[in-house]
Image: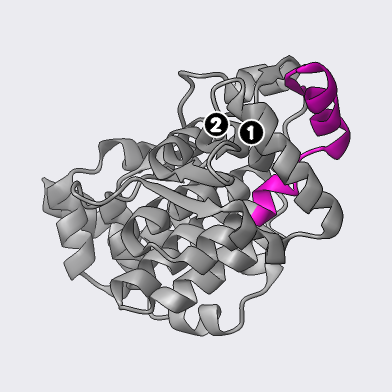
Amino acid sequence: MEYLVAAFFCHEKFTVEMYRDFNRSANNEILSFIAEGPKLGRENLRQGLGHILGGVEERVIAICSGDERISREISVLRKYNITEQNIYLYYYNLVSSGRTALAMDVLRKGFSDVGTVGRISAVISCVSHAIIEYRDKQFVMFLLANVITSMNRFHLRDFLKTGIPLPFIQVHATSVKSIAVAESVRFDGKRGGTIEISADDLGRFARRASANSLFVHFENRPDAARNFSVSIDDLFPHLDAEWRELVVDIAAAASAVGGRIPYSLSGEASVRFMRGASG
């Protein structure tokens, strides 16, 4: 039966609903037949990723990343091809073939160019895996500078003056980055100033932020360190003068309330980002 399902999938064009039904019902045997079958099956599987609203197993990404067109696409990255599914596919294709440095470059570009909630959530999911697996300090400092400076400076100053949590009402790529800081970054202004990011917390937030869009969780080595710390001084070259001063003040203020920046959710943001939600 599994062979017949896989054979049908490899030779027929599916509708959007058929792709979604297939993703919910495909088992390991069906996926094995597709992986070993004609390339049209892998291309169909890849096309179907663009229609899935929810979680997908890493194995599906592994099969789709064997698409022969991916290497050419990566060589000419443009905004139009940095889609949610391609972020996962390009990242997996590169790290599984030992091209880790290029994979980090793809994620950097994703953080700089991605403009939708689903896409930035996909980047964050891949980043949570990369932090644990590759321990790239320069990449982590780029990441921290990018997400911290995405936060609203006026709201940060209100927090510094009054202790008011940062408010989030709308759902957009900038709010995803900003809440990612509050969810996963811990500041310590008492030990010379350090910033620590929890990759596990970042990954859990990516799952919530990916609600109603494609989400993939890549497994990490269980014995790998889950957190990464940098000194505030090390981060300074990535920040302008105004942000340097703000980060020092944020570290001191956040240290007094447990290390993390407090925030509040209301409106559509409370629905999308509430704890317990998943993609």
Residue 145 is at least partly visible in this image: yes
Q: Residue at x 38, y 79 (%)?
A: 99
Q: Position of residue 124 (x, y in %)?
A: 52, 49
Above or below, 103 relative to 187: below
Above or below, 16 relative to 154: below
Quadrant in the rendering for residue 71: bottom left
| Numbered circle sitting on residue 179 | 1
Local packing at callout 1 (Cα closer than 10 Å; few below 14, some 14-19, many 20+) is many
Circle 2: residue type: Glu
Report if the CB atoms under discs 1 and 2 are less than 8 Å apart. Answer: yes
Above or below, 218 relative to 269: below
Residue 14 among magenta residues = no
**In the image shown, does 184 or 76 lie closer to the viewer?**
184
Residue 158 among magenta residues = yes
Q: Which residues are magenta?
A: 145-169
Quadrant in the rendering for residue 267: top right
Above or below, 64 relative to 216: below
| Numbered circle sitting on residue 183 | 2
Local packing at callout 2 (Cα closer than 10 Å; few below 14, some 14-19, many 20+) is some
Q: Position of residue 84 (x, y in %)?
A: 55, 53
- Tell whether 66 sits left or right of 118: left
**In the image shown, does 242 or 223 lie closer to the viewer?**
242
Circle 1: residue type: Ile
Residue 174 is at least partly visible in this image: no
Q: How is the image coloured?
A: one colour
Q: Residue at x 11, y 45 (%)?
A: 1
Q: Secondary structure at mark 1?
A: helix
